[in-house]
Image (tube, rainbow, N blue to C red):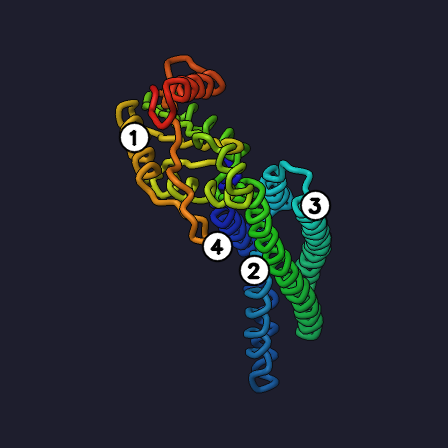
Amino acid sequence: MNPAYTEKLRPIIVFSAVGLGLFAASLIIWPLWINRIAPQLLGAATESGGAGSQNLIVFGCIIGLTCLNLVTLMLPEASTIEDSMAQIAEKITEPGSMAMGIEREVSANLDRIIALLKSHSEISRIYSASLENAGRNLIEVTSPEQLRVAIGYLITENNKMRKETNDLQSNLNESHLQIENLRENLEVAEETGMRDPLTSLWNRRAFDHMLELQVEAAIKDNTPVCLILADVDHFKKINDSFGHLIGDEILKLVASTISKSAKGRDFAARFGGEEFALILPQTPLETAQKRAMQIKHQLETQKWFVSKRNEPVGTVTASFGVSQLQLGESKDAFIGRADSKLYEAKIAGRNRVAS
């Protein structure tokens, strides 16, 4: 059964079990109460001016507290928390120092939670045995004094169990906060590892993962998906003329232009070097061609200057290859066709779109 579905059913199952248990117990205790205990307590009330009635109230409160403590059965199982933590651990795919540190902390928190739950399980077992023993003693009582002793025992056991439950809840809350912090740190570490440090676009690793997902979705839903590959024209000449620092600034500006053209589910990435990629889900080839032409126009009409000296760099252009996923085509073949179209655009004179 689905663990999430099981967790939703847990409160219903527990309360149903508690209700049935109390009903069954009442069938056994009620005759005893009517025939033996109640007459003695009521008799004691007459003699002591209401002390017996007070005992009745106390006894009822203790039974109520005992029932409330049964709700501790609703605490999450160790296996449920372990499954949740395993899902976090599965996200750690790189042996980087930050990710490895988070993995160790997750493991430590998991061990701590399981130890807490095992300890509480043992204490709950002892508590259940104590209640069972107290139940037998209640059946055997013959005087109000014996009943007071039994009630005092139940009060002590209830106080112990409540303290243990409060401590467990406090520790679980603390571990939950730590795990949430680890989850956030892991997401930051993952995104950092998926971003290109120069342009802040997604990197090749992120591109490969996203393209694989989009290819699967396109096949499943029978929808088109297109890929645009772009390469900055004569980038080596820019580096030779203005230096690598200016070349880096040019790459940032090209990346910004491509990123701003992305809409909705589109995914822009740095493919490598001076090459960029744009994945267009649910987009036919004709629309993808128009998008590539728009980006080409924005680049070729933009005025480029060296930031520090405000020296004009000249025209910066790019060549584009566009392809649409074909029936039965693999991810690598899809990329290969877009790359071939990019090569055609460069051979044909650059600053153009081929599809």
**Do the residues under discs 3 and 2 have CB atoms within 8 angstroms?**
no
Q: Are marks 2 and 1 in contact (CB under 8 Å)?
A: no
Give the quadrant of the C terminus.
Answer: top left
The mark nearer the N terminus, 3 or 2, is 2
Residue that badge 2 annotates: 67
Tag 1's secondary structure? helix
Q: Nearer the viewer, residue 13 or 135?
A: 13
Residue linked to disc 4: 308
Which quarter of the picture shows residue 294?
top left
According to the image, label 3 marks what residue? 97
* Residue under the point 65% across and 37% down: 94
| Amino acid under disc 3 | Ser
Give the distance between the C-alpha atoms of the residues marked 1 and 3, in whole angstroms. 43 Å
SS for dot 2: helix
Question: Mark 4 against mark 3, which lies toward the viewer?
Answer: 4
Where residue 296 sits, quadrant-wise, is top left
Task: Give the class, few, some or many, for how many residues have Cα within 10 Å of label 2's Cα (few <14, many ≥20).
Answer: some
Residue 206: percent from left, percent from top: 51, 35
- In this view, 154 is above or below 55: above
Relative height, residue 34 to residue 243 (above, below): below
Mark 4 and mark 3: Cα distance apart in space? 37 Å
Which residue is located at x 26 percent, y 24 percent? Answer: 286
Q: Earlier in the sequence, mark 2 or mark 4?
A: 2
Q: CA distance from mark 3 to mark 2?
A: 49 Å
Inspect the image, locate mark 4, and give the three-letter code of the amino acid beneath it: Lys
| Contact flag, marks 1 and 3 (Cβ < 8 Å) | no
**2 or 1: mark nearer the eye:** 1
Q: Earlier in the sequence, mark 1 or mark 3?
A: 3
Residue 251 image point, x, y percent: 47, 40
